[in-house]
Amino acid sequence: MSGISLTPVLLQLERAPGELRPQIEAALRRHGQPLRWSITAVQRRLEQPALLQIEAIVCCVEGG
Amino acid sequence: MGSTPPLPTLLVIPTGIGCAIGGHAGDALPAARLLAGASGCLITHPNVMNGAALYWSDPRIHYVEGSSLDRFAAGTLVLRPVRRQRLGLLFDAGIEPELRQRHLQVADGCRATLGLDIGPVVTTAVPLEVSLSLGASGVSWGQLGQPQALLQAGRQLKAAGATAIAVVTRFPDDPDSTALAAYRQGSGVDALAGAEAVISHLLSRELGLPCAHAPALSPLPLDPELDPRAAGEELGYTFLPCVLVGLSRAPDLLPLPSSDQAPGPTAVTATTLAIDAVGAVIAPAGALGGAAVLACAERGIPVIAVDNPCLLDVSAEALGLQVLKATSYAEAAGLVLALREGIAPEALCRPLSSLR
């Protein structure tokens, strides 16, 4: 029987041009289906894109 | 203000980040009531409204669980106000019989005294195994060892006719922890909040129903130094009354087809509320990095950033967002009223620069 598990994820994401939300959700989807997330820190860098810290819980399907 | 149409407004105060206002037991409720008055229509989430044994019911306030609020802001669902919901009660099998009985009596009290429609009641097949944790930033998170059991019980309730679900899970007692002592005395983060959000997000997202959570805990010893903001949680044996009242008139959640799907039966109508109608979103100035606020900003909805100290420093400047700044929720209410009346906020400030 398939089930789900919940997994915490901590990401550092370099900001790309454009809207932020799709970038974050795409990065999280590599780990599972995003359930809850937030940007919890932003590191602004000279002549480089900002580095975002994302904390999240994602859902992963197990078994099958 | 009588003839001015409402300005639907989102109020977001993320849970578990130690906000000075909204970081304890429903202590953002006075701000929500003010903003409901200013806007005529406020959409907000349980962390703002839930004061354990304390609550406030206002037909201008729409109680929407956090993940549903995110989807509403993203334009993937609309809200349909209702007269009442039929509340299913979902219990964690890990709750001891006496504590479970206390919760059932609260539900009976809400039926008898407030006239709420509560039932059926379902208990999970196995204990849900809730655990608490802190993230890298210090914000509260949590885990659920048996998410499938939660969803199975939720599906049973939905099949039995529940239109909204109040979920009660056994949280670990830790009466001697320094974090709990700090919280009760008005500092630190609500250690329970992150796990609560995970539980209600999962249930609401999977079932498509309004859901909210109350933790089941053993009573705490008296603390003479208790902060007023935490006092709502020490008035009874459960945190359930506010959840039942909030859900009793929570709007239905109607999904919209995504842009790559054929149009479905759900449509925006005169009786539903869609993100396109929202005129402002209000959030703590240091916590602008959540899904709902970013989705609103993408749509060009004015963001009102309120000074409300918290653990985070994810500001408009850090994210490159244009915002209206407010030093308090009272000032934010003034800005909402200005937007509702069609007054450009910059006209209320000096100096007013010349057009070029």
Image (cartoon, coloured by chain):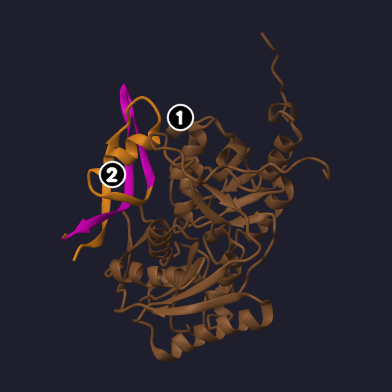
Chain colours: A orange, B brown
User: What's the residue at 47%, 44% (across, down)?
Assistant: B256
Judge whether A25 appears above or below B20 on screen: above
For the stretch drawn in magenta, what is the main secondary structure? strand
Amino acid at circle 1? Gly
Instruction: Write down the chain letter for disc 1.
Output: B
Return the residue found at the far bottom. Answer: B98
Residue B280 left/right relative to B352:
left
The front one of B343 and B272 is B272
How many C-alpha atoms fall within 10 Å of the one at disc 2: few (<14), some, or many (≥20)? many
Can you see residue B27? yes
Residue assigned mark 1: B320
Quadrant in which the N terminus of chain B appears: top right
**Residue B289 belongs to magenta span:** no
From this viewpoint, is residue B226 visible? no
Q: Pick out the residue farthest to the left.
A: A63
Residue B105 to residue B331: above or below:
below
Looking at the rendering, the stretch of residues picked out in magenta corresponds to A38-63
Q: Quadrant of the C terminus of chain B?
A: top right
Magenta residue check for A41: yes
C-alpha distance separating marks 2 and 1: 22 Å
- Residue at label 2? A28
User: What kind of residue is marked 2?
Assistant: Leu
User: Which residue: 57% across, 53% down?
Assistant: B44
Residue B260 location in percent, x, y? 38, 34
